[in-house]
Amino acid sequence: MSLGEHGGALRYPLPPEGALEPPARWAELRERCPVAGVTLPSGDAALLLTRYDDVKRVLSDPRCTRSLGADDAARISDNESGGVFNDSMAQSLSGAGQARWRRMLTKWFTAKRMNALRPGIEAMTHQLVDAMVERGHPADLKAGVGFPLPVWVICDLLGVPDRDRDRFARWSDLLLNLTRYGQDEIDTAKAEFYAYMSEHLDAKRADPDDGLLSALITATDADGEGLTDAQLVFTGQALLVAGHETTANMIGKMMAMLLADRERWQRLVADRSLVRTAVEEALRFDANPGFGMPRYVNEDIEVAGTVLPRGTTVVCSMAAANRDEDAFTGASAMVLDRSPNPHLAFGAGPHSCLGQSLARTELVTVLDVLLRRLPSLELAVPVTELRPVEGLIVGGLRTVPVRW
């Protein structure tokens, strides 16, 4: 199979076989067409990478950029949905600007600092489990624990009131969905979110606290330069959306994966020392991660024997790469004690996920608490009845019904 054989006709994202199963086409593409032409939701053409080595290389290559606003870049969707791909401020934080921005934030997201948050995260998880148990079962684990916990954590970190969490959820859905909303709805959400964050930052200037946003208002880099007002607003928006949407969905998917096979859950109940490796394996094994990482090629490069010319838009499927048998022995099986596990769930290179230590801390804490509190936990519906969320850039399940 050659690059041009699909001719851009393979529609992307590829449909999964089930809520927890990968698209059947992944294995075929990795083996026979590692650089495949695809048609994006916008109708524009792009190239899809599915092999581990290729994805890792492109994500780490400075010639493959986030300049998705270039005139010849493929549009992801018909509308200018969200901040993740098309926001003008996101584009401005590229290259040296993005590196500077990351340096100013990185010290807030170290593994040591995130681990220091664990007692508070654990206490909140217990409160949420208490409330879920009191309401009785069957219960939706995503609504009861998966969504409210990351919202509380990121709001606490930023110094934003978590009573506004329903507004954040609505804005996130509007700005991260590729297909569900019209441009007018998206524009309204962007304006509302911008106004909200601007007002919040004004309040922090007047009355600072010990949260991240208050610190960033006065923070400077090595040259004594701080973030502009627009960059501060973008930072708050990006952290709120990314800080709860992706982790909330991952909590639900992780638990569904572990409960889908009773032996997995029982093994963890019997040996909680496997929690950390089980979390990493759930991140690797996730077949419903959403869109993947698009990149704009600003200089000809060769990938898998194919020259990608300048102006090409490439989509890196980290999830497909994470199922590559050349990178992971027994890649199609969920191995709870897999180590090492150099998965690409958080990307690779200079644009890897800034908040991965926070996400790991939340996932490990939730899993550990649920194993202790609800060892009899099980899915309340057959796995075949689980349904993915449609259209989101980040993948997730609509609900995760459980009983105990």
Image (tube, rainbow, N blue to C red):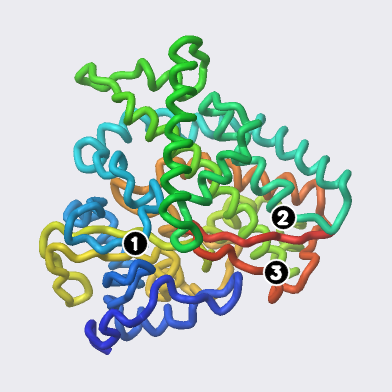
> Tag on residue 271?
2
Q: CA distance from mark 2 to mark 3?
A: 18 Å
Q: Earlier in the sequence, mark 1 or mark 2?
A: 1
Are the two marked residues, 2 and 3, in contact with CB atoms closer than 8 angstroms?
A: no
Q: Hey, which quadrant is residue 168 in on the image?
A: top right
| Disc number lying in front (2 or 3) | 3
Single out the residue that lies furthest toward the front. Answer: 184
Q: Secondary structure at mark 3?
A: helix
Residue 278 makes an appearance in the image: yes
Residue that appears at 51% across and 46% down: 172
- Residue 101: where, in percent of width, then height? 30, 33
Picture quarter with the C terminus: bottom right
Picture quarter with the N terminus: bottom left
Residue that appears at 22% across and 75% down: 304
Residue 340 makes an appearance in the image: no
Which amino acid, by three-letter code, is at mark 1? Ile
Q: Hey, which quadrant is residue 162 in on the image?
A: top right
Residue that appears at 34% across and 53% down: 348
Q: On the image, numbered disc 3 is attached to which residue? A: 260
Q: Nearer the viewer, residue 128 or 51?
A: 128
Q: CA distance from mark 1 to mark 2?
A: 43 Å
Q: Secondary structure at mark 2?
A: loop
Q: Secondary structure at mark 1?
A: loop
Q: CA distance from mark 1 to mark 3?
A: 33 Å
